[in-house]
Amino acid sequence: MVIMKLSFYGGARSVTGANYLLEIGATKILVDCGMFQGSKYSEDLNYEKFPYDPTEVGFVFVTHSHTDHVGRLPKLYKEGFRGKVVATNATLDLIRKALPDNLRLIKQEAQESGREPLFSIDDLSGVLELAQGINYEENIELSNGLGVKLHDAGHILGSSIVEIQLTSQSQKSEKIYFTGDLGNPPTPLLRAPYYPNDADYVVIESAYGSRTHEDKDERKNILQKIIIETIQKGGVLMIPSFAMERTQELLYELNGLFNDKKIPRVPVFVDSPLAINLTEVYKKHSDYFNKETRYIINSGDDIFHFPGLKFTRSSEESKKINDVPGSKIIIAGSGMSTGGRILHHERRYLSDPNSTILFIGYQVKGSLGRRILDEEKEVKIFGEKISVNCKVEAIGGYSAHADSEGLLEWVKSANGEGKLKKVFIVQGEEESALALARKIERALDVDAVVPKQGEEFVL
């Protein structure tokens, strides 16, 4: 009998740091190897040695390219990993753009804290050489009776649900699904997530496990209203945006609003070199988009470019944004205001009562974005105290994460054959994960566990 053991070394009662070790006999598989984010404590966790031997890991399956799922891959290589990294082709293209940018930030942070950088450019190059891109629904056989497939998670471009299937000599099979981050359909660009119906075990995210998003149509109406109100006051709309997916979705929505004359034409700046580079990847992989988006593209509309839109790559171009008079929309990284060019704009405009800051993604505890969202009246940026006088808005419907109802529906589907034994709830703050666990147990009478960091389970 083959023993399966599942261990949680990140993403346990925490949104970030996703890192799950599945041992099936002698085969050791990691799902994700992400960075812990949001606080000084998180930074310390990133520097700790992995609690397993990376030299013994044969495969890493990557659900998607966000830093909290891939950021420690080069560190894994540094500590001896020489197996295979497997992800969709789009995910690997995004990683190749995003990880070098991460390294630049890591070097800056290390210099400020007097530490060695978490990894080097050689570690980064080394782990990317181990990467293999595959398509959705393509079966990868790891050993006799052990296979893996990636399904569309609908979260960001190339995002995947990892299905691992073990078939015994009696032809009885067991399946475990890792959701990564589940999408929030319908999204402007992507297809809906895959819904399995034959799970024995599920490892599911819970970022919004206790909350419900606004209706998608309502989301666009709210964006339109915020833009119009800010322009009427002559203010600046700042949008801290994740370089991946959120920025591209915003450009799609703004393109539609301008084309339909729903909002006045004002300058729009994408002030993030990484977001600009990643938008190029999106253009390359339009085959991952949903039917509606492909139809719009095929009709000749460039969804990532419209009159008034300017991409500012250099710091000089970024500084010149301040010289543009009147109202404008500034989309800049980082999404939680933990770094990047958005800080310069926040320092300038947070104190302006006519301006608005709009959050469109999850704000982890401890981040500057979360503190602004929690209505702190004064924050510190670059050592300077800044009053928060501008209007603070948030649109949950722009989240790329499924909400409480969406997560429950996915688990219900996974239990379609009625053989679901246990659900492990991860990648959410403790309150959110526990709320989802209670909801699942009430609805399905299935054991729902919120694992602790380092906890192990024999399946």
Image (tube, rainbow, N blue to C red):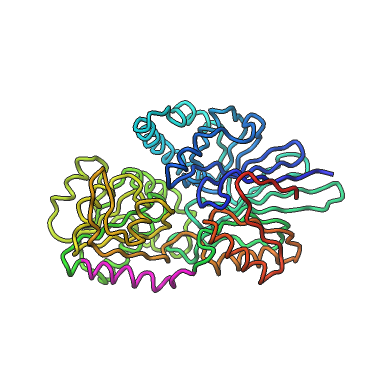
Quadrant in which residue 214 is drawn:
bottom left
Is residue 314 at all visible to an observer of this figure? yes
Residue in the foreground of this view, choosing between 282 and 163:
163
Residue occupying the point 55% across, 36% down:
131
Residue 10 vs 355, above or below: the answer is: above
Is residue 302 at all visible to an observer of this figure? no
Picture mark count: 0
Residue 418 left/right relative to 101: right
Residue in the foreground of this view, choosing between 145 and 205:
205
Residue 55 vs 455, above or below: the answer is: above
Residue 227 vs 170, above or below: the answer is: below
Reply yes or no: does residue 371 show up in magenta: no
Residue 450 left/right relative to 69: right
Residue 89 left/right relative to 280: right
Residue occupying the point 53% across, 36% down:
73
Reply yes or no: does residue 221 show up in magenta: yes
Residue 96: x and y in percent read 45, 38
Quadrant in which residue 454 is drawn:
top right
| Magenta stretch: dominant secondary structure | helix
Residue 33: x and y in percent read 55, 41
Residue occupying the point 75% across, 45% down:
4
Residue 168: x and y in percent read 82, 47
Residue occupying the point 60% across, 30% down:
81
Q: Residue at the far right: name it.
A: 170
Residue 142 left/right relative to 123: right
Residue 168 vs 223, above or below: the answer is: above
Residue 121: x and y in percent read 44, 28
Q: In which quadrant will I find the N terminus?
A: top right
Residue in the foreground of this view, choosing between 120 and 153:
120
Q: Which residues are magenta?
A: 212-230
